[in-house]
Amino acid sequence: MSDNDTSAATVNQYLTFILNGEVFGITTDRVLEVLDYTDITPVPQTPDFMCGVINLRGSIVPVVDMHRKFGLPISKHTVNTCIIIVSATVDGEQTSVGAVADSVREVLDLDTACIEATPRMGTRLNTDFVRGVGKHNEDFILLLNIDTIFSAEQFAADGAVIQAAEKGSV
Amino acid sequence: MADLPQQAFREEAYELLAELETALLELEECPDDMEVVGQIFRAMHTIKGSGAMFGFNDISSFTHEVETVYDLVRNGQVHVNKALVEISLQARDHIQNLLDACCNGAEADLATGTELIAKLQQFMPPPEPQLQADTQLQADTPPKTVATTESHELKTYRIMFKPHPHILQNGTKISALLEELADLGTCRSIAQMTRLPSFEELDPELCYVSWNVLLTSTCDEDAIRDVFIFVEDDADLNIHLIDTGEEGEEEGQRLGDILIGRGEVTQNDIDRVLAKSKRIGEMLVDAGLVDQDQIEAALQEQTVIREIQEQRRSKKAEKMPVSSSLRVPAERLDELVNLVGEMVTVQSRLSQVAALRHDADLYSIAEEVERLTEELRDSTLNIRMLPIGSTFSKFKRLVRDIASNLCKEVDFVTAGAETELDKTVIEQLNDPLVHIMRNCMDHGIEMPDVREAQGKPRLGTVFLGAEHAGDSVIIEIRDDGKGLSTAKLREKALAKGIINAEDSLNERECYQLIFAPGFSTVEQVSGLSGRGVGMDVVKRAIAALRGSIELHSTEGAGTTVRMQIPLTLAIIESLRVTIAGASFIIPLTAVEECVELTYADIEEAHGRHLAKVRGSLVPYIPLRKAFGVSGAAPPVQQIVITRTGGRRLGFVVDHVIGEHQTVIKPLGPLYKNLRTISGGTILGDGSIALILDLAQLMHQADTLEKQVEIEHE
């Protein structure tokens, strides 16, 4: 009985989504909502993975293109393209961020036992971004660490800003 | 929830400490002003009282010692001098430290306290027995007068305090309550002994007495209730306002009316007794309707009210207007401002829709809404406005401390303390102002002897003034010290590599050098200023408030720093422009005019970014280029000519749409490294427009230009 209890306590829910055919997961605690893709207002002088900002019921929320962020090939927008609004901690400040994904799949219950440490190599991703690899049926799901993906250091824009401006002035 | 009262105490105490500081500084200037002494005493007393109540015993016992000295000052037994004020200020700081320590759970520094108390005790005269005597208040204590300020309305309350018999069993000290009441103002109390049984039946552990207290004070009913806060359940407490301090009231109330008002007799009783012709008081006693004590109390009340009204008539001329205020948590106000912001957004959408529909009714409603929203916005933003004077008093202390630290003699002059600014703006102005003031005192004002040798008065002057100018406030800090030498500034900037030897700078630009990062003119780093971080931090802080800062100086005669700060941060008047279909917002305060820019104009200038505006050349920044926008610009672009950082500068955009009420929203921490965009706003159609930070755009263009120059060399 007690065994059952402990195992129940270690099941976490993940929202899975597709990027370039691969399955990724974010813990549902951090997912606020999923929106259909809307027009995004671009913000000048920012790195290209920063799509811009959207109006989410009166608040301005930044949106990040996950393909560009992870260096994946850019895919075309379809009816399934969506923006996942997550709650991230940036520099100790809680903030909402939108992430553009090709499509959202489902909410999965994953037992901690099914999650393995991130392999050091071969994921083609910055391993800091990945919390672990979950196994579900025969799929491998890369579980993302929201806070490292959206940390301000990753977005250190100063250099990028000048570059963008120079690019513009050529 | 448990430490809510403590939280309230802290807030109150910080406020009182600020008050105390102001009063002490005032006292230093006019040591004989008994009203100020009264203020100081009351502030200390409240800190002591509520400190003890909420278990801040360190604070309470320390404050008690300080208070004792001021009690003596109040009684004329101790005279105020500079040394006393100095120690009192230190004591004030100590109380604040104790309070901070309590808040952070840190260990309080009790040694300083003991030291300060020892110093304070030197001011006390040798102890006289009647002074040290306990001031236990008996039921028939003669009226105790506390120096009450005349700046507020004096109100008279009738407090009927009827403790339940078992109240003493809880350890309640009624005398302490009455004493506390007496400290609120002029107080007369009459004990009501009617319930007192014969001696054989008397239970010494029960309380048979009740009290009628007449209190004339500036405090409100809540303050009185606070005194009884812990015995509320163990006593019947009735508080009536019997004299509001307002003009035009009748003579004193008649005794009969008072008794009726107190519910002790009815009109019928009075009428019946009045038929006989003895004095009404006696008659009522004879009739057994009331007893002697109650009559006594009512008579006292009558006298008090007559006296008060008498007093008021005599000083009718110097009466102050009534002002009542309300304390509201800042977050609630912020919420309100946010809501108003939403409202403004929705309203602009409504106006936009109405303009398209060609429906006269809808249009007139939209106009009405627009007008109301504007009023709502203005009055909401007004609530957040505070007079800047509240920070001025803090600087008074700062100047005083720095002056004595540096052995300089400085007079601090302020003007425009009543100038109102948004609360957050005032808060954010504090640090920059401290920096500048320190610089004035440290680098500006010379030593007294040096000043004298130069034929200046020994006493240096630091001026801090504020005034309104349109929808911004100008803050000026001026000293009559040695001023800045442009040659020296140049030399220094060269040595630090901030400028190049061939750079030619006009006077104004020379002074602006002081705001460059890593610039400091003093060779030696002092404890006060001169680490070379000060002024550029100041500039950045002011820029964050969307303000500007400039410095002028005359060598040998002094330096002036002028800051222009927008009144509020939440909503601004602005100009909406578009670049490649995207909307951008330019703060209207900076905008001077808009002119057209055609391809022909660009060719004529041979690719240089200069525009001819009515005979003068104005440099411009093509925003399409700066933002890396691809595609061709429209044949006729617009240049928005602005005054940025004291310079005329144009910004080229595709189209100018028109004026816009902009509710500023932050872009969030992800964009915090993006300097050129200071925020965003939501337009009527739900799309987002970004707010341009002109000063940063200019700075970026300057930097790029320099890089290009270097590459060309």
Image (cartoon, coloured by chain):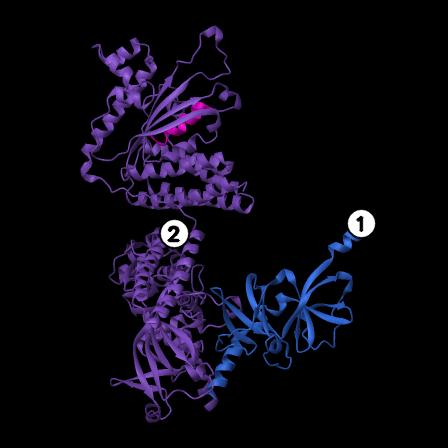
Chain colours: A blue, B purple
Does residue B460 appear to the left or right of A108 in the view shown? left
Circle 2 residue: B401
- Locate residue B562, reporting x and y percent: 32, 65
Q: Is residue B240 above or below residue B675?
A: above
Q: Quadrant of residue A153?
A: bottom right
> Residue at the top extreme?
B200
Give the quarter of the figure containing the N terminus of chain B.
Answer: top right
Residue B478, relative to residue B289: is it above or below?
below
Residue at x 22% of width, y 9% of height: B276
Q: Secondary structure at mark 2?
A: helix
Q: Secondary structure at mark 1?
A: helix
Residue placed at 30% from the left, 19% from the top? B266
Instruction: Classify B421 as above or below B220.
Output: below
Q: In the rendered structure, are the residues bearing label 1 and label 2 in contact, judged by CB atoms less than 8 Å apart?
A: no
Q: Which residue is mark 1?
A: A2
From where the camera sits, is residue B411 visible? yes
The amino acid type found where label 1 is placed reads Ser
Query: Which tag is nearer the camera, tag 1 or tag 2?
Result: 1
- The picture quadrant where one finds residue B251 is top left
Which segment is the magenta one?
Answer: B173-185
A35 sits left or right of B365 in the view? right
